[in-house]
Amino acid sequence: MALQTNNSNPDDHPLNLFHIQKSTLIINRLYILFHSIAIILIFYFRINSIITILNSKTQPLIPHLLIFISELTLTFIWILNQACYWRPVTRTVFPERLPEDENLPPIDVFICTADPRAEPPLGVMNTVISAMALNYPPEKLCVYVSDDGGCPVTLEAMREALKFAKIWVPFCNKYGVKTICPAAYFTGQKEIDDDVVVDSDDGFEAEKCRVKEEYELFGEKVSKASESERCISNKDHSAVVEVMVDHESKHNQTKLPLLVYVSREKRPFYPHHFKAGALNALLRVSSLISNAPYILGLDCDMYCNDTNSARQAMCFHLDPNLSSSLAFVQFPQSFHNLSKHDIYESELRCTFKTLWRGMDGLKGPCLSGTGYYLKREALYELPSMLEDMINLEELKQNFGLSNEFIRSLFKKCNTKIDCKNKLFDELLLQETKHLASCEYENDTKWGKEVGFRYISVAEDYFTSFNMHCKHWLSVYHMPSRPSFLGSCTTNLNDLLTQGTRWSAGLMEVALSRYSPFFYGPSRTSILQSFCYAWMAFLPTTFVFSWIIAIIPQLSLLNNINIYPKVSNPFFFVFVYVFVLSNLQHMREIHSTGASLHAWKHEQRVWMVKGITSHLYGSIHAIMEKIGVKEGNFLPTNKVINEDETKLYQMGIYNFQTSSIFLVPLCSLVTLNLLTFAVAIIQITFHKVHFNDVFMQTFLSFYIVLMGYPVLEGMMLRKDKGRIAPNVSCYSVIFSVFVLSFGKLLVTLF
Ligand SMILES: O=c1ccn([C@@H]2O[C@H](COP(=O)(O)OP(=O)(O)O[C@H]3O[C@H](CO)[C@@H](O)[C@H](O)[C@H]3O)[C@@H](O)[C@H]2O)c(=O)[nH]1
Ligand SMILES: [Mn+2]
């Protein structure tokens, strides 16, 4: 039998399969065709009107030009985006066909945390414990925590976490618990119901109670320490590396993954490159300790929700047809605190259910910061170097001066981590601290050509773009049970702050010499470059959003028609584009199993981000480019606030955010409301003809409809989450100002 298996063709029993979604592919391509024809007709109409105006000088040119610019921006983004719809695929895996446990490769788990105030240590520890409980040989797992907060409470919490893991992991193994994150297991009824309990009569309930008590004790200890004054970020300290040693292991039969705490050196005025810098420090430190060939990357709030993700990922990494060119397997980001009224579109539904599947049909999805199994080698760029004669000087220029680290590049991973002989080695620990020091990266290629890349705060996006440009592939796997669950943004402030950071990070790349539109096509496929370029240039849609919310309205009030009359055949082309694109959006939503309410929420969030995050992110990136501002990575808040959660769960907007976000939003909605009111009055009293102004009036109406929650927050609500009266006041003054002086703008030329 054994002989037969060895000789059999692995293609008969593949570890994974992929399926092209044929019907979706056909619909998407037909849509692209019809929409493109309509866009060409609109451009024809625009150019024609502009030429007519230039010749006849009967109307001011500027509003027509501005609207044309906005349409060009949107079309540019639309074209790039279509690449993500070109060839959607889905994948299936067969973990039962994997080799025996002893032949599975080791995995290092990297968990990053940065700020104990925004990221409560108990949440971080739940992520750590869930990773330790993965269904994978424990001697082949090593869990590293990078603490950019340099906080002693996090270190203590880890020691406690190790103690609790010794109870938790055996419990999960014994009873086949699927929800391996203790906080989720003991609080989330839904997940527990899914759990299959092996041998349920075997004292399960009693043991569950005991484990629960232990968890509560552990939770109390950590929470108490988190409330103390010591629980703050320290931005000025030397490197700390601690390998958590289980002193009782002699008496304890259970094997647990090794746990390592790393807090790289931090000094004020020393650039530390945020998360990418933290990950690079982890890459180096771990290379001396376990040096696993694969890395599972997790954000501190993203716990493992399925025990099997590592084995599923190995179905791709160990596939002989894929292995040599596969850089990473990306799992979707899913969230445990989503509301069924996801008013902030925190689910990122389209990205993780449609776009990444589309990219998977090209060269593979973009790295998403968390929930990926990455091949270490893909960050080192070693293959070509190995072929040449090994040049030590060159290696040191690339990787820094540590001989130990350079040696690790050529060493096979330590298939079994030998705590007894190695880790107590003081010299080795000293070397890991050197590798985690501020100065180690000076004059090396870290962040430039080696490791996670620096020039953007969207390090995940930029690093994977670099990998795809170096001919690596990636794979997207979306099992029915979410493999990882994190906490999503549940208020407008977090949403827009995070959105601004993402926009800044993406625009940093768009404006750099790595701009995907130019840098990509010769290095990876054109369609793949389009997907990356789409993300990089997405923030530029602020141009469209701002123009469409102001110019047609000002034109309407000043009797300038920038859209065709109802009787004009081009009118139907505009209607057709509007209806067709919305139908396609609805079809896409339906195909992912979401309700059509998502359509409303997504349209709204798109408009809101266009007006705020995309604009501010772009400004930030431009200011960085000209050297007047520095990059910034403010971690998203992960503290649960009950009032906020309640509002989010009920689908009510929480407008407690900075006026820098609110004033533009309120002003533009008010401006559209006023315009709409004036237009209706004018139509009613026959001052203008409905036929002439239908489109501009409808546009204002649509914006008011989409912006209704803002008006409600300004005028009707009395609760804490409403818009403050002074913000409303400024906004009304600002919109009246724009309406009064806008005449100058639209009639000047
Ligand atoms: O200086 C820093 C800043 C952040 N982080 C960690 O990075 C992770 C992601 O930060 P978060 O604030 O949760 O960012 P999100 O906006 O939710 O993250 C998305 O977008 C980021 C890029 O902007 C990616 O890094 C993330 O993986 C991705 O989930 C967290 O674990 C942080 O602790 C650090 O380690 N060091
Ligand atoms: Mn996050």
Image (tube, rainbow, N blue to C red):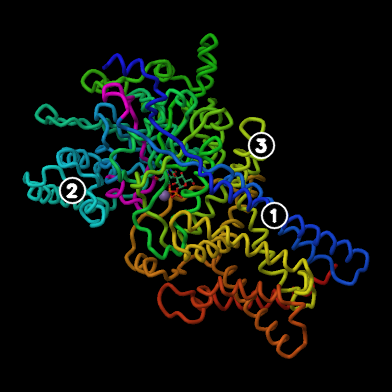
Compared to 561, does 277 lie above or below?
Answer: above
Left or right placement of residue 101 versus residue 34 in this view? left
Q: Amino acid at mark 1?
A: Thr
Residue 388 in the magenta stretch? The answer is no
Q: Quadrant of residue 638?
A: bottom left
| N-term mark: 3 or 2 | 2
| Magenta span | 97-125
Task: Please report the residue visible at 55 percent of the width from the left and 72 percent of the height from the top.
Answer: 707
Q: Residues within 10 Å of mark 2 (few under 14, many from 20)?
A: some
Distance of label 3 from label 2 (alpha carbons): 50 Å
Nearer the observer: mark 1 or 2; the answer is 1
Left or right placement of residue 377 versus residue 485 in this view? right
Q: Are marks 3 and 2 in contact (CB under 8 Å)?
A: no
Q: Residues within 10 Å of mark 3 (few under 14, many from 20)?
A: few
Residue farthest along the bottom direction in this orientation: 685
Reading the image, the residue beneath label 1 is 73
Indicate the secondary structure of the residue bearing disc 3: loop
Which x, y percent locates residue 553?
A: 71, 73
Distance of label 1 from label 3 (alpha carbons): 21 Å
Q: For the C terminus, which image quadrant? A: bottom right
Reading the image, the residue beneath label 3 is 513
**What is the number of callouts on the image?**
3
Task: Please report the residue visible at 15 percent of the width from the left and 31 percent of the height from the top.
Answer: 254
Which x, y percent locates residue 100?
A: 27, 24
Tell me the number on the disc at residue 218. 2
* Residue 745 in sight from this viewpoint: no
